[in-house]
Amino acid sequence: MAANTSVVPVAVTTAVVPVLSTNGDFSDLREIKKQLLLIAGLTRERGLLHSSKWSAELAFSLPALPLGELQPPPPITEEDAQDMDAYTLAKAYFDVKEYDRAAHFLHGCNSKKAYFLYMYSRYLSGEKKKDDETVDSLGPLEKGQVKNEALRELRVELSKKHQARELDGFGLYLYGVVLRKLDLVKEAIDVFVEATHVLPLHWGAWLELCNLITDKEMLKFLSLPDTWMKEFFLAHIYTELQLIEEALQKYQNLIDVGFSKSSYIVSQIAVAYHNIRDIDKALSIFNELRKQDPYRIENMDTFSNLLYVRSMKSELSYLAHNLCEIDKYRVETCCVIGNYYSLRSQHEKAALYFQRALKLNPRYLGAWTLMGHEYMEMKNTSAAIQAYRHAIEVNKRDYRAWYGLGQTYEILKMPFYCLYYYRRAHQLRPNDSRMLVALGECYEKLNQLVEAKKCYWRAYAVGDVEKMALVKLAKLHEQLTESEQAAQCYIKYIQDIYSCGEIVEHLEESTAFRYLAQYYFKCKLWDEASTCAQKCCAFNDTREEGKALLRQILQLRNQGETPTTEMPAPFFLPASLSANNTPTRRVSPLNLSSVTP
């Protein structure tokens, strides 16, 4: 990001948009509440409803102000008075989504507020026509090919105003949105940064900026205003960039300074725990949030993802019915219903609801990704690829879409393609073992075994979610006839699955015991070989081999064959397992320095 981002023109008419001092501390919560109530009104007057709602919700979480401290309405300028009739009529048309009609009556208005509504009406008219054309003529997978025809004209007009320093904070925000829609990302970032300096209270500008930041390095180059709003922005961007510890710390700080009743912060914390797969914690917070705000729809699709992962059919069914009663035509509701049908393996119905969500909002990231998953389930790889690509167009930080593309190309047996997509997913989630295992499998198929070893070992080191990394690493050592390293990996695998304390069926447990039984047998360690062979008898697929090996060991012992005593200690099966006990602690990693990244 270029350093000139910090150049911020400050010529703005404060008489039109009165902005209170927004310093970076939270010492005066009453002052912050006044600012939030002020900006909620200003954004509502301009039709920026999501920003208005965000400000109002945050203000509601703070203590009520006494009558004497309530903020008076903003002063009316001469220009405002002249445009009042046209603005009042146009705003009524705007509120019923008659955008062209609103723009027609605002043409020629000079006040900042009326001019913004004029330009915003034209922008929304173009967006509405684009969406209508898409729904009428194309399937949901073709949405990216339809453009908003008004964007170029708006850019030319707003650019002239920008160069003349005639745009206020709201005008800069709209100019940034137009630039982003035209894929002029660098220029859009510069304008959004300028908007946050001119009008720091407007959450919409911060949120748009957040959607354009792709990594932490990019964030460092931004010259952002020192305001308390910056803390909310940083918490949000840290969550988006998967920097969850930093995000949770920021949200905890915001709770500590007085925002403990904010449903927005509580929901963001739940999303953060969802992102690090702390499912129990996330479910607990979402359930608490539902008690506090039972008619809330935002983030409920994330809640449904958690219920889906846990296969909680009845809870997911209740959530879907509940949201249907509240508003069946919200994208979140459609995604929740889609997840419900997916959990019931009715994938065609699930895809239908995700398509419905995309008709309501073509830029809704979750629906694209989930629809890609459904097409994968239906073995429709070309449609899955299109869906995942659209998800990436909406948000390049969506690791699930990159991972989904990798899986799709893996099915198509195109390892070089899936290697690229798995790498991108791994860059976004460097500590996610699933990405590393997928990368390792890819390298294995390409016969890059050293890289595969590094990936599997790294997956184990960061905390292997699926408990498969060590088994895959062991099989790789087997393939390379590195029997000692393979034995080490299998021993670690067995120790880990026994020490986790969960009664889970591990499909590779029998494989590990079979290999160790054979390994100890070759090393003439009869006791250890016998213990592992007995374990093999507990599994259907290795029972006969285990019995055969026990007979061989008994025969050799009867012949007076003596066990060896020259094997190094780490290769002995732990005594706790030999005694058929469960180890109570997780042992430290064995020395596999030769394959450690």
Image: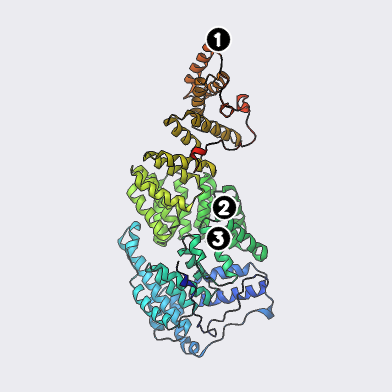
Q: Residue at x 63, y 32 (%)?
A: 583
Q: Residue at x 60, y 54 (%)?
A: 285
Residue 484 in picture, x, y percent from top left = 50, 29
SS at badge 3: loop
Circle on res. 560: 1
Residue 459 in picture, x, y percent from top left = 50, 43
Q: Nearer the viewer, residue 533 or 204?
A: 533
Q: Residue at x 60, y 57 (%)?
A: 248
Residue 341 in picture, x, y percent from top left = 45, 48
Give the CA distance from mark 1 to mark 3: 76 Å
Give the CA distance from mark 2 to mark 3: 19 Å
Mark 3 lies on residue: 296
Label 1 close to label 2 by CB (< 8 Å)? no
| Of the two numbered discs 1 and 3 in the rendering, the one whose residue sits closer to the viewer | 1
Give the CA distance from mark 1 to mark 2: 60 Å
Residue 145 in picture, x, y percent from top left = 32, 62
**Quadrant of the frame with the N terminus:** bottom left
Name the outermost residue toward the top.
Answer: 559
Circle 1 residues within 10 Å: few <14, some 14–19, many ≥20:
few
Circle on res. 203: none
Q: Is residue 309 above or below residue 271?
A: above
Label 1 close to label 3 by CB (< 8 Å)? no
Mark 2 lies on residue: 273
| Of the two numbered discs 2 and 3 in the rendering, the one whose residue sits closer to the viewer | 2
Residue type highlighted by circle 3: Arg
Q: Is residue 467 above or below residue 402?
A: above
